[in-house]
Amino acid sequence: MSSPAAFLNEVPGWFLWTGIFLPVSALLLLIIAYLSWKIRETEEELAMTTDPRETASQLRHSRPRYRHPTHTHTHTCAERT
């Protein structure tokens, strides 16, 4: 008898199910969920841009993804009192 067949004859079914099949299946499902989440996130970012070349330029120059609005005025200590 070959060694894989002998191994499968000696290993109980519950061990194969809970020790190998379930963890591998759970890991694959988590990878699929993560990748689909990242694809959705990327599609949302692409939908916010008006021109695809703008996105390519941002990625090439590694600018931040979102720009925060700058303040138009500043307060000095004299104005606060």
Image (cartoon, grey):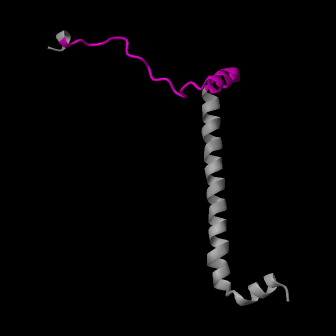
Asked if 59 appears above or below 80 in the picture, the reply is below
Q: Position of residue 9 (x, y in %)?
A: 75, 89
Number of callouts: 0
Say left or right for 73 vs 50. Answer: left
What residue is shown at x 59% (from left), y 26% (from top)?
Answer: 62
Q: Quadrant of residue 47?
A: top right
Is 56 above or below relative to 39?
Answer: above
Image quarter for residue 8? Answer: bottom right
* Residue 53: in magenta span: yes
Q: Quadrant of residue 55?
A: top right
Write down the region rendered in magenta.
Answer: 49-77
Residue 23 percent across, percent down from the top left: 62, 69
Identify the residue at horizontal 23%, vertical 11% (top origin): 76
Q: Is residue 26 left or right of residue 8?
A: left
- Position of residue 35 measured from the top left corner of the image (x, y, whole percent): 65, 48
* Name of the residue lying farthest toward the left: 81
**Viewer-proximal residue among 11 and 69:** 11
Residue at (52%, 27%) from the top-left corner?
66
Q: Is residue 3 above or below residue 24?
A: below
- In the rendering, at what x and y percent does residue 61 appear? 62, 23
Q: Which residue is rendered at x = 44% and y = 20% of the image?
A: 69
Quadrant occupied by the C terminus: top left
Dominant secondary structure of the residues highlighted in magenta in the image: loop
Q: Is residue 16 above or below residue 23?
A: below
Q: Quadrant of the N terminus?
A: bottom right
Front residue (pair 32, 10)? 10
Residue farthest to the right, as pictured: 1
